[in-house]
Image (tube, rainbow, N blue to C red):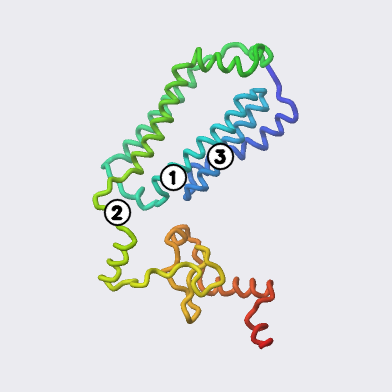
């Protein structure tokens, strides 16, 4: 029997709820970026747990590989496949949700059954386990006793990456339109002949989050990015006007002062 010290106990009771919160964020977050952040937090905290238990190599690998490389792979898949939630509402294969639920329950039952029948050997202590070094001991287990499990896990990660590329790939049925082709098309249809207004026209900035303003000062809806609309980050005219006036007052560049000086 071993007993945790005061510092280890404090770290565990402080970090364990945060890791559980990150795992729940991965399950219930509506935005893919928030789910990725929760996943990263959980992985980093797991690495801290490993380092606390004197498994330094495993902890560093957990932080660098999983919180770095695997997280980048996760975000890469999100950017390739897309974050539009409308696709998930369409069931392309009839009965796939029911089959997925039954498969998940079967996997959960199999996991619980395997864990319940697990027998652990007697505790030998970290000093004896790391007698030849933590890295050497871990290498003997990975490339010795658990070599097949390690190789199967590697194959699954490669399969996931290849599957993401296949899902993101789209066969082009028509030749890609050039800028001249789009211009001719707009002229023939008589819609947006001069092109869509770009962000920042008649405004103080040309960033994508600054919509174009019409001559009367109103916002041109055609210049608002559809990505910002999908994220719900578009503000109304009153909010934008109030923020602009507050910014002008803070910089001393308000229209009232300019009118008074003139």
Is label 3 in contact with label 2 (beta carbons under 8 Å)? Answer: no
Residue ranking furthest to the right: 6
The secondary structure type at the circle numbered 2 is loop
Residue at label 1?
A: 78
Q: Which residue lies at the image location 50% right of the left edge and 42% below the top edge?
A: 26
Q: Which residue lies at the image location 60% right of the left edge and 32% below the top edge?
A: 46
- Please state the horizontal and vertical placement of residue 205, each as a whole percent of the image: 55, 68
Is label 1 in contact with label 2 (beta carbons under 8 Å)? Answer: no
**In this orientation, which residue lies closer to the viewer: 146 or 135?**
135
Q: Can residue 239 be seen in this view?
A: no
- Please state the horizontal and vertical placement of residue 231, each as a whole percent of the image: 47, 57
Q: Which mark is residue 189?
A: none
Instruction: Give the mark, 1 or 2, whose residue is nearer the N terminus.
Output: 1
Q: Residue 40 carries which label?
A: 3
As drawn, 259 above or below 238: below
Instruction: Give the mark, 1 or 3, whose residue is nearer the N terminus.
Output: 3
Disc 1 to disc 2, C-alpha distance? 24 Å
């Amino acid at each position: 029997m071993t007993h945790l010290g005061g510092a280890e106990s404090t770290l565990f009771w402080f970090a364990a709820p945060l890791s559980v919160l990150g795992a729940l964020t991965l399950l219930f977050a509506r935005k893919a970026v928030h789910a990725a952040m929760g996943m990263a937090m959980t992985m980093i905290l797991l690495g801290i747990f490993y380092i606390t238990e004197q498994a330094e190599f495993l902890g560093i690998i957990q932080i660098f590989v999983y919180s770095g490389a695997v997280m980048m792979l996760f975000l890469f898949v999100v950017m390739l496949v897309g974050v539009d939630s409308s696709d998930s509402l369409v069931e392309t294969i009839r009965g796939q949700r029911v089959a997925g639920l039954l498969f998940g329950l079967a996997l959960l039952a199999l996991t619980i059954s395997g864990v319940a029948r697990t027998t652990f050997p007697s505790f030998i202590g970290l000093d004896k386990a790391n007698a030849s070094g933590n890295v050497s001991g871990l290498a003997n287990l990975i490339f010795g006793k658990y070599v097949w499990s390690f190789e199967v896990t590697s194959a699954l990660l490669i399969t996931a990456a290849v599957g993401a590329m296949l899902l993101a790939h789209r066969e082009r049925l028509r030749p890609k339109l050039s800028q001249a082709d789009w211009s001719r098309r707009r002229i023939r249809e008589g819609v947006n002949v001069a092109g869509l207004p770009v962000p920042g026209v008649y405004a103080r900035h040309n960033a994508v989050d600054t919509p174009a303003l019409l001559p009367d000062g109103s916002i041109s809806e055609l210049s608002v990015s559809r990505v910002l609309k999908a994220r719900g980050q578009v503000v109304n005219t009153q909010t934008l006007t109030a923020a602009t006036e507050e910014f002008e007052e803070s910089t001393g560049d308000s229209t009232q002062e300019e009118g008074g000086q003139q």
